[in-house]
Image (cartoon, rainbow, N blue to C red):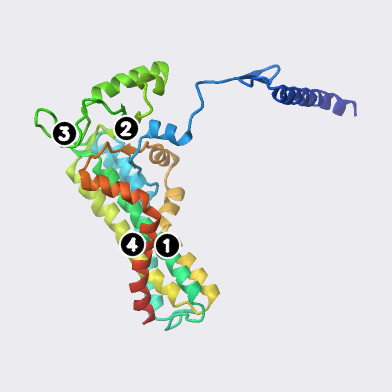
Amino acid sequence: GVTNALLLEPWSSCFLSRCVWLLAMSLARSKGLSPDKLSCDPAYFELEKVGGAFNPMAESQRENGIQQRVLPENVYTAAIVAWLNNESASEAAIGAAFFTAPPVALTIFLQVTLTYYLQVGVKDYDGDLEAVCLTDHRMLLYTGLSAFVGLSLGNLYTILEAHNWLQMFGSCERHEELMLQKYLLKPTPQAPTGTGKEESGKEESSVYPDCVDEAMDGVARSMEGGLGEAMGTDDVRGVCRPQSGITPCARASFYAFLLLPWAAVTVGVLFAGSGSVLRSGNRFDLVLNCVAAIFVLELGEVTYALLLPRTIKNSTAGLPPLNRVGSEGGAVASALRKYGTLFFFWIVIAATAVVDVPLYYFWCD
């Protein structure tokens, strides 16, 4: 009993002191005292404001930029990053042979095999599948089909994101280790307006803006006085661009062995999985078949989490988003990005409905 009392005495005194401190802080706030400098713990810590208040969205745009191109995280994209992170092509080939190629090959084999037998099972009415669609609960039927189709289209959109990320890199003759460069970009009075050409008549570069030198000066100043103070404007945007390139052979391999198989498997699962959903024998099987088809669709994420070492996963997860600048890519591409962002929800709903119709009539006619 004496030992327990000795052990509890420091804890109880610490608890009481914290209660007294919290009561004092509450009374100070109620009296209108400024909380700019508050003591968190009378003995150890003290809170002091650093800078001013900020909006999280605006701060994210300053740090990460807008028009972001982010590489998704799965076994296919991890193989791309692992290849690019090596200093030479020979090291990249050895790393792929030992670390990334086996998980990718296993993922493709599992997805192709399961998709094939899913397709055969739907055609042969295996298990509780029926020769006709479940017409007694049309609302559930449409809901399950639309949910599965929407997830499949989301997977295809992820492939498009990986493609856009690769398009940010230029071509090079020899293998180059992945290198990125951060800039600070702000509007300048000298920037061209409306014509898309400089005063000299030369077209504006579509790779890097003319204010790169000013942006780099801003980087140096931001390291001393903060981002907003360095540039002196709220229009500052962070820009991250690749400094390294990708060889034509490596780029072709990424598409031939990673992105195209990934897209083909997604389309196959979309077609076969919709049949298993539409031809379910009852309500419970409809939900189960929808979940099973989604599992086949997301095997890339499962093998990414299970079969890749932490080092490779960290290199993929830690990549900053790449950014496009202004109307880079042309006025049409800029307009598509703008209105695609504004009406993204309705575009997804419309695309899902457009895909639902032919799948429904194919399996239910």
The answer for how far apart the CA atoms under marks 2 and 3 are is 18 Å
Residue 265, numbered label: 4
Q: Amino acid at mark 4?
A: Val
Q: Closer to the camera: disc 3 or disc 4? A: 3
Q: Which residue is mark 1?
A: 296
- Residue at image position (40%, 15%) is 224
Q: Residue furthest left?
A: 201
Circle 2 SS class: strand
The disc, 3 or 4, on the residue closer to the chain's N-terminal end is: 3
Badge 1: residue crowd in 10 Å (few <14, some 14–19, many ≥20): many
The answer for how far apart the CA atoms under marks 4 and 1 are is 9 Å
- Front one among 48 and 313: 48
- Front one among 95 and 264: 264
Residue 204, numbered label: 3
The answer for how far apart the CA atoms under marks 4 and 2 are is 34 Å
**Residue 110 seen from this side:** no
